[in-house]
Image (cartoon, rainbow, N blue to C red):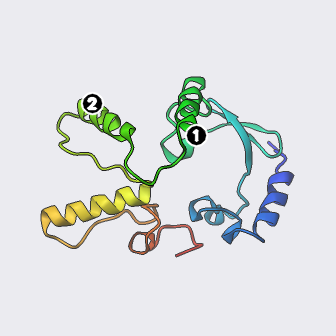
Amino acid sequence: MNVDRSTSDRLHHEASSHLVGGVNSPVRAFKSVHGNPIYFSSASGAIVEDADGNNLVDFVQSWGPLVHGHAHPEIVQKVSEAMAKGTSFGAPHVGEIELAKRVKRRFPYIDLVRFVSSGTEAVMSAIRLARGYTGKDVIVKFEGCYHGHVDSLMVKSGSGLAT
């Protein structure tokens, strides 16, 4: 099967002049598979369209958080409603309380909730919590996997770009 990737190749060449490795994260570098990344232009549900107009099934789903797929109408509506109330406060927000209550109702064994801004922050917090609870400093991580963008976790992460 021969699929046109000429636009993605051109975009990668252009992006390489502006972004480290031509991508915004080492995970997207494609260096380990000896090719150029595919650049996407739009998506709906489980289908993504690349810059060359090819439609593909998105098995990545943003590495986990897109369990409802792309641009689900109800989610787009609710996010739009929330954005109309303000985009980012950098301070406590009334919605955090309700969300924390919902998490605790769903998982009754959770006493307190901490919201963070990224997977890296979540992993760093989990490591800090585990070290504090166990009193041990050593942690185990899977070689060749991405566990967050922090030096102690990037060692041998497999990207080849930043490690």
Can you identify the residue that label 2 sits on? Answer: 106
Residue 117, image x, y percentages: 44, 54
Q: Is residue 14 left or right of residue 80?
A: right
Report the residue at 86% width, 53% height from top.
Answer: 6
For the N terminus, give its image quadrant.
top right
Q: Against 46, is 134 above or below?
A: below
Q: Is residue 11 left or right of residue 137?
A: right
Report the residue at 45% width, 61% height from top.
Answer: 145
Label 2, residues with CA under 10 Å away: few <14, some 14-19, many ≥20: few
- Front residue (pair 33, 29): 29
Going from N to C along the chain, the mark reached first, 1 or 2, is 1
Can you identify the residue that label 1 sits on? Answer: 59
Residue 4, image x, y percentages: 85, 47
Label 1, residues with CA under 10 Å away: few <14, some 14-19, many ≥20: few
Residue located farthest toward the top when viewing the structure as drawn = 74
Residue 90, image x, y percentages: 45, 54
Residue 32 visible in this rendered orientation of the protein? yes
